[in-house]
Image (cartoon, rainbow, N blue to C red):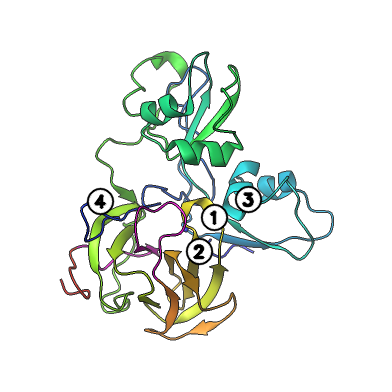
Amino acid sequence: MRLLAPATNIDPNPAKGSGDIAVVDGAALQAQSGPSGTAADIAEWPTSSQVSVYTVHSGDTLSGIAKMFGVSVNTIVWANDIQRGVIHEGETLVILPITGVRHTIVKGETLASLAKKFKADATEIAQFNGLDPAEPLVAGTTILIPNGDISSTAGSGAANGPRRITRAPNEPYRGGSGPEYSGYYSWPVAGGVITQGLHGWNAIDIGAPRGTPILASASGIVIVARSGGWNGGYGSYVVVQHNNGTQTLYAHSSRILVSAGDSVAQGQTIALVGASGLSTGAHLHFEVRGAMNPYTGASVGGSE
């Protein structure tokens, strides 16, 4: 069932996290590098911004589900904290399509050097690919680098294909070109201040103390309520599907107060601010999917 599918703070080391995990519609970890480490030929970018929710049926396999949704097996494993590749009938899986770079390890490379080369995070690389940070990387192994940026390494190998798509160096976010629903979305935190502007998937980060109420920005149905785990860097997070066809995502919570399937009213407390997942401090990572994010210039309390 295709539904939607997941900073800076007030201190000197501002809270931030998962903002640059640019969730690309429908195809996780869109390949951006070819066999030689150059930009791969890509016919087109995916067109949907919806996260997917899938219930495991008897006989399902991870590879079969990955093929069904057009994503990698690792994307499903990473986003659902699946242990030893085991899934169970009736289990609900969230499909988070996350952009990244495909790379073949060469002799002498380390997680740290790859993170530096591709402007990525060493912990994310290890988590996504099931690598032990204490073990050396094996030359010749192909891995996927979540949110990897090859803008600085894509200059060579121009003969690899007729069309090349790379991530522009100044591209701060994706998914913000939808319609503007003036007055539809309310400020999603009780207080707080924007600590990182538009980034990742049409997201902002709102710094607030741990335990601050997170509020539903508009009424709708909860389709994802994940408590605990890495979850693709989002940590504990909620996704709400709205009547206008859009979705909002609330990440890094310390506590989830709703369940999938719940109806929520605008302004209802659905979670509490935390720093779970990929985060350096307490804040809310707030995404609007399918429409413009109205809080591009807001300060405290959502005033613009």
Crowding near the residue tagged with mark 2, few <14, some 14–19, many ≥20 C-alpha atoms within 10 Å: many
Magenta residues span 273-296
Amino acid at circle 4: Asn
N-terminal label among 1 and 4: 4
N-terminal label among 4 and 2: 4
Pointer 1: what residue?
231
- Farthest residue, direction left: 304
Question: Residue at the location (41% across, 60% down)?
Answer: 275
Amino acid at circle 2: Ser
Q: Secondary structure at mark 1?
A: helix
N-terminal label among 3 and 2: 3
Between label 3 and label 2, give the one nearer the viewer.
2
In this view, the residue in front, 236 or 29, is 236
Crowding near the residue tagged with mark 3, few <14, some 14–19, many ≥20 C-alpha atoms within 10 Å: some
Residue 13: give its label: 4
Q: Is residue 248 visible?
A: yes
Pointer 3: what residue?
69
Q: Secondary structure at mark 4?
A: loop
> Is 199 located above or below residue 154 in the figure?
below
What is the C-alpha distance between the residues marked 1 and 4? 24 Å
- Farthest residue, direction front: 134
Q: In the rendered image, which quarter contains the C terminus? A: bottom left
N-terminal label among 4 and 3: 4
